[in-house]
Image (cartoon, coloured by chain):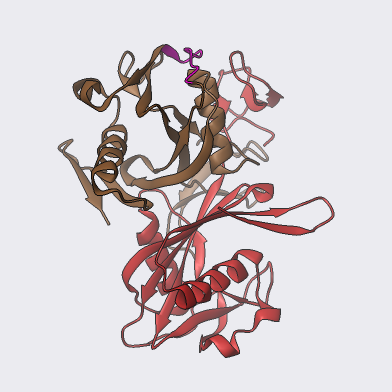
Chain colours: A red, B brown
Amino acid sequence: MKYCSECSAIVQLKIPEGDTFPRYICESCQTIHYQNPKIITGCIATWQGKILLCRRAIEPRYGLWTLPAGFMENNETAQQGAARETMEEAQAKITDVKLFGVFNIPHISQVYMMFSGEVKDGKSAPGQESIEVEWFEEANIPWKELAFPVVQESLELHFLDKVRQRVTVHYGDIIRDLNNKVTVNRY
Amino acid sequence: MKYCSECSAIVQLKIPEGDTFPRYICESCQTIHYQNPKIITGCIATWQGKILLCRRAIEPRYGLWTLPAGFMENNETAQQGAARETMEEAQAKITDVKLFGVFNIPHISQVYMMFSGEVKDGKSAPGQESIEVEWFEEANIPWKELAFPVVQESLELHFLDKVRQRVTVHYGDIIRDLNNKVTVNRY
């Protein structure tokens, strides 16, 4: 951020009075421009026990497999966003949508909200951001070609739940340190 | 948003090619300025079965009671944010922090992430944004003087859980329609 989006003056990065974090401040119109984490909302969509994955047609991680997910939009709920993303990326309509897990990814200031849902008729087709979409059994999940650690974590927990016959909402962190090492905290 | 924060040119509100939502677009430097929901993270902090509430020293809802909560910051996890807010607003240190519930408030594009936590020594004092802080038993909760519907919903669910002896993560929506009527959806 270089300029004030309200008045176009140059902004300064400073800690406002009474605050503890540096913010972009406009000294011309006094606007404080807060920047906060973003929510990614997505879905573990199932049909006859299989899971819907999308092969990414966009960067980052072009060509790798992911769960349908994307930035939550203003004025929608997270589950509406998960259904929208599943429709956009895999042209699949989910029902029985339930919160599956919440995952912090603090180094990129993102919070993933993953839902589970059923695609009753199994209909799906690649959307604009997918090269292909496919239904995978557990034995065939392309573990080595997943796009993001949060996708791996969600799938691992999904299959663990099946073994444990548990239905709980998961909560965890995915931490990438300065040496690029990923640590997963499950709470 | 009136001006591009990257180059200071005037922005236009338009649907970008391949998108379905209107965004602020800079036709000078081509930046698309996305706006997304914000996360509020907070805590139901307990000590000897009592609950910590803060009387707001700031607008909106000056003088009304709330749970310690505030905007999640970049590069923190939601539970770190909840602990930070509880320290800032009530000078109380929470332990045993667990995810309690997630609540969509789509009309203001907010998602609340509420945690539960223990304040082992019961120490608390008003922070800068609180007139006073107090420990309330269930019978004394100031139901008519709560600041926000999400505070009421969180407290109601907390006391329901005690009756049902359930520990699950709650998920719901708080919808305010154009006539200002509030509807709560519990999933």
Given residues A84 and A30, the one toward you in this image is A84
Q: Which residues are the magenta region? A: B122-131
Q: Main secondary structure of the magenta part?
A: loop
- The residue under the point 23% across, 51% down is B185
Please state the horizontal and vertical placement of residue A81, each as a whole percent of the image.
40, 60
Note whether residue B136 is visible. Answer: yes
Q: Is residue B129 above or below residue B75?
A: above
Please state the horizontal and vertical placement of residue B15, each as a whole percent of the image.
46, 57
- The residue under the point 35% across, 81% down is A119
- The residue under the point 38% across, 46% down is B101
Q: Quadrant of residue B47?
A: top left
Residue B132, magenta (yes or no): no
Please state the horizontal and vertical placement of residue B85, each as a whole percent of the image.
52, 28
Q: Is residue B102 above or below residue A123?
A: above
Note whether residue B18 is visible. Answer: no
- Quarter of the N terminus of chain A within the rendering: top right
Given residues B176 and B32, the one toward you in this image is B176
In the displayed structure, does residue B34 sit left or right of residue A148?
left
Single out the residue that lies furthest toward the front.
Answer: B48
Given residues B24 and A187, the one toward you in this image is A187
Q: Is residue A175 above or below residue A63?
A: above
Given residues B134 and B111, the one toward you in this image is B134
- The residue under the point 40% across, 73% down is A87
Q: Is residue B161 above or below residue B136?
A: below
Query: How many marks do you count on the picture?
Result: 0
